[in-house]
Amino acid sequence: MSISPDNNMLINELLRERDSLYQELSRLREGDNGALAKAEKKNEKYEIIIKEKDEKINKLIDQLAWLRRKFWKPGSERFIPQDPNQRRIDFDGLDMLPEEEEHAKEAEKELIAYERKKPEKTKKRPVRAALPEDLRREEEIIEPEGIDHNWVRIGQEVTEVLELTPGEFWVRRIIRPRYALRSKMQQDNQDETQKNVLIAPLPLLPIPRGNAGASMLAELLMGKYLHHLPFHRQIAIFKLSGVSLPASTINGWTHSSCDMLRALYHRLREIVLATDYIQVDESTVPVIDNEKQKAVKAYLWMVRSVEKNLVFFHYDKGSRAQRTVVELLKNYRGAIQTDGYQAYSIYENKKGVLLLGCWAHSRRKFFDALKEDKAGAEYAMGQIKLLYKVEAMATDQNLDHEQRAGLRSRLGYPIMCAFEKWIVNYYPKVLPKGRMGKALSYTYNLFQRLSRYHLDGKYLMDNNLVENDIRPLAIGRKNYLFCGNHEAAENSAVLYSLLGCCKAHNVNPREWLTDVLTRIPAYNNDYSLDLADLLPHNWKTSKSVQEIPTTLN
């Protein structure tokens, strides 16, 4: 069969049209695939951005919730589980030996049994205390009207009312009569006349050629560093009593007083660092930077001797760097108890130093995670509470250091072993960057330090005593806001240290400061005298340590 030319042309035309359609379809398919790939890449990019933003939003929501709890709710970290009698150690998922599990359960049972046997403490009703007998009393007798010879006095009713007179300024006039021999008064030689003139030596004054007495300086220092009153407020209070003092005079008196007390402060540091168990912490204090013309965040370091109950603050141009604590404790040998600040990790492997952790800081991390993971945080806090119950049991039974260490090894150590393994197994179930994840990580990384307290009965579980002693610094910066320069911050370290020791040993700071500011010029002039005698804990035992000269020759 033959194909006509017309049909051949038609077929060719159809083939060309088919080819063009195929080519166009191929181009469209390629374009769709490219657009689809681009769209998929865009979607992946947007998904990453959305995920990052979601994480940031969740983090900000968590921070906002924490800040609301911090500033608008009670600051107490006290936590009571809903049913404390049903608390138990959950060993689900823990890779523990049967002996370890048995020891931990037995320890918890013994603690619970001890708690149930303890008698409940009865609350004492408040009773009005009698006014001190040594206070000056002014009697006011009120006779009833209509009394004549027909009435006989049969007794009296006495009502005591406490009154207050604001602080009274008074002037101490030191009068030194000058005497000369009568037979020598007519001599013309002035040098010979001076040799025959007698006058009493001037008593040692806290500030040479100054007109501020020891009691005045003591009141000024107490107002700033004990009652946290800025100098401008104290000046206003003095003015109400009729005494106007310029700010420059107040500042001069303060610097001179701190200079006098600085040697005593350094002696205190020597005594604290000579003990074998200290606690260390640091806190902020704003200091004016003249170059930047603004207040910058600086740090005061605090060291506490647990054995002697003494504290001192250290200021090194406001630095919080590791070199500061290295220089401060370079020659120290003994136990150092700190929080988890990384600067202290250098002492982890130092010979002669044992680094201890703070369970209160660990518990605080879990307390902050309650809203995020209630079940896990409650369990962790429950285990820490068991460890504190061991301490309460030892205290109730008046155990000595050796007996307390034995009780910790028998009851506390098994609970710590179980708690550590629970942390390892529970960590994969939480968000690493969440509050619960951070609490678990913080506790696990410091677990060796946290568990070492059981080695010796004199070691404490936490650093709470240091935080109590450092609290006046926080109150002070809320009142006087900042220190004017580095010298003022160093003066603060001196006064906070000495007044902190007064508080620790229940020493009246007014009496101590007045007496020490009177005596210390003689100590600074005679290096054979030991300044340690003037420290509050020694001063309390004997207010008159020895008879020392109080006059200038």
Image (cartoon, rainbow, N blue to C red):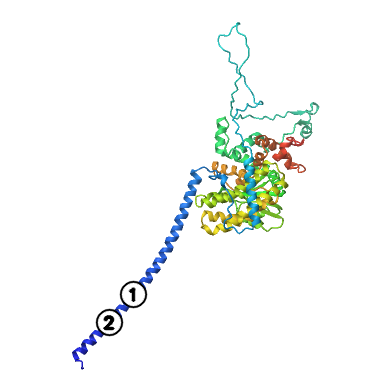
Element type where label 2 sits in the image: helix
For the view shown, which residue lies furthest in the bottom direction?
2
Residue 239 percent across, percent down from the top left: 56, 32
Marks 1 & 2, CB-CB < 8 Å contact: no
Q: Is residue 462 visible?
A: no
For label 2, the residue is 20
Q: Residue at x 72, y 44 (%)?
A: 400
* Earlier sequence position, callout 1 versus callout 2: 2
In the current view of this chain or complex, which residue is farthest to the right? 183
Q: Amino acid at mark 2?
A: Ser
Left-right relation of 208 to 284: right
Residue type (three-letter) at the residue carrying disc 1 = Gly
Write down the quadrant of residue 163 in the picture.
top right
Q: Position of residue 92 (x, y in %)?
A: 57, 56
Q: Which mark is residue 397?
A: none
- Characterize the local packing of mark 2: few (<14), some (14-19) or many (20 or more) Cα atoms within 10 angstroms: few
Viewer-side residue, 493 vs 90: 90
Above or below, 231 relative to 165 = below
Q: Quadrant of residue 29?
A: bottom left
x and y percentages locating residue 144 in the rendered image: 57, 12
SS under mark 1: helix
Residue placed under numbered mark 1 in the picture: 31
Q: Position of residue 68 (x, y in %)?
A: 48, 46
Note whether 79 is above or below 101 in the view shown. Answer: above
